[in-house]
Every structure is written in C-alpha cells, then in structure tokens.
Image (cartoon, rainbow, N blue to C red):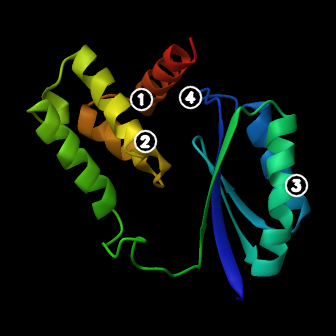
Amino acid sequence: MGHLEAEFTSEPFHGEGTPPEHAVQARAAAEAAGLSTDFGPLGTSVSGDSEALLDALPSIARAALDGGATRLTLRLQQPGASVEPDGTEPGSVLDGIVRRVEAELGTRLSDLDRAGKQRAVRLLDERGAFQLRRSVAAVAEQLGVTRFTVYNYLNRDRHLDQD
C-alpha cells in the first residue's frame, strides 16, 4: 500500500480555544506511533506508512475514548487522491450539499435569519457536510457567521438530540 492519510474527529466539540482532552490524547497516540500530525479545531490529520497508520488506529481510538470522547469519526485516504469517492472534484461535494439545502430552504444561506441558519446547519450535519475537511470554515463563510457560531449550532443540536 505505501503511504496513507487519515483524518479523525472526536466529539464533543468545544469550538475554538483549548482543545478537549480527548483530542489531545488522540493526537499524542498518533505522534507516539511516529505519524505526522496536523492538529486542527475540528479534527486531526495524520499521515505515514500505511502499516504504521493502520496499526496505530486502535490506540488512537482508545486514547480518544479514554479521554472522554463520545464519538470518533475516521476517514482514510491514499495521498494525492484528486477526486472524492463519488468521482467529483474536491470541494464540489460540499458545494452540492449546500446547494441542495439552499434549494430546500428556498434561499441562500447568507440570507437566512438566525433560526434559519440553525436549521441549515442541522440539515448540513444530517447530510454529512461536516465530515468533509475544512467544511466548518466554508459553511461559516457562506452563512456569514464565525466558525465558533457553527460549532455552537452543532453542539446545540447534538445536545437536543440527546435529551
């Protein structure tokens, strides 16, 4: 196989600021396995030899869960892949999801009121938009809000779903 890249997100999110312990512990497990890491507010990207990366996944998951994660999402990819799994160009998957949500809501994301923006974030989340790399920043820009606001909407909806 050669080389692999993985991106994992652990929840609950805390938005911007100090990263949650589960994210810190998952990153430490990846680094302990000798993987290159790129730590971000929504997820951590790791890369390395495919065997080393695949062997490290259980310890990364265990570290996140031991650190308090309630959910761990993983995406694996061979580096240099220039298309999404459905054959579309990168970025167009999110654009397509956003266009469908805008059509459903009858207006552009930027024209929605606060309640409409919260509903849009919920719909985008249901359709998997936030599983895509850098999607929170892109959606925040289209909504005309900060990334922190999008994280707050996501956390609000997820807490409501648990009640």
Which labelled disc corresponds to residue 59? 3
Q: Which residue is mark 2?
A: 136
Q: Earlier in the sequence, mark 1 or mark 4?
A: 4
Answer with left or right where residue 34 lies relative to residue 73. Answer: right
Q: Nearer the viewer, mark 1 or mark 3?
A: 3
For the residues carrying marks 4 and 3, which lies nearer the camera in this image? 3
Mark 2 or 4, nearer chain start = 4
Residue at which label 1 appears: 150
How many circles with numbers are drawn on the protein?
4
Mark nearer the N terminus (2 vs 1):
2
Residue 79 drawn at (x, y percent):
57, 79
Kindly identify which residue carries mark 4. 15
Q: Which element is circle 1 on?
A: helix
Q: Image check: 72 left or right of 154?
A: right
* The quarter of the displayed image where residue 50 is located: bottom right
With 161 as the anchor, is 31 left or right in this view?
right
**Front tag of 2 and 3:** 3
Amino acid type, label 4? Gly
Residue 19 in percent (x, y) is at: 70, 33
Give the Cα separation between the discs numbered 1 and 4. Answer: 9 Å
Label 1 crowd bin: few (<14), some (14–19), many (20+), radius 10 Å: many
Residue 103 or residue 15, whichever sits in front: 103
Cα–Cα span, label 1 and label 3: 30 Å
The reply to whether dot 1 and dot 3 touch (C-beta < 8 Å) is no
Which label's residue is closer to the chain start, 4 or 3?
Answer: 4
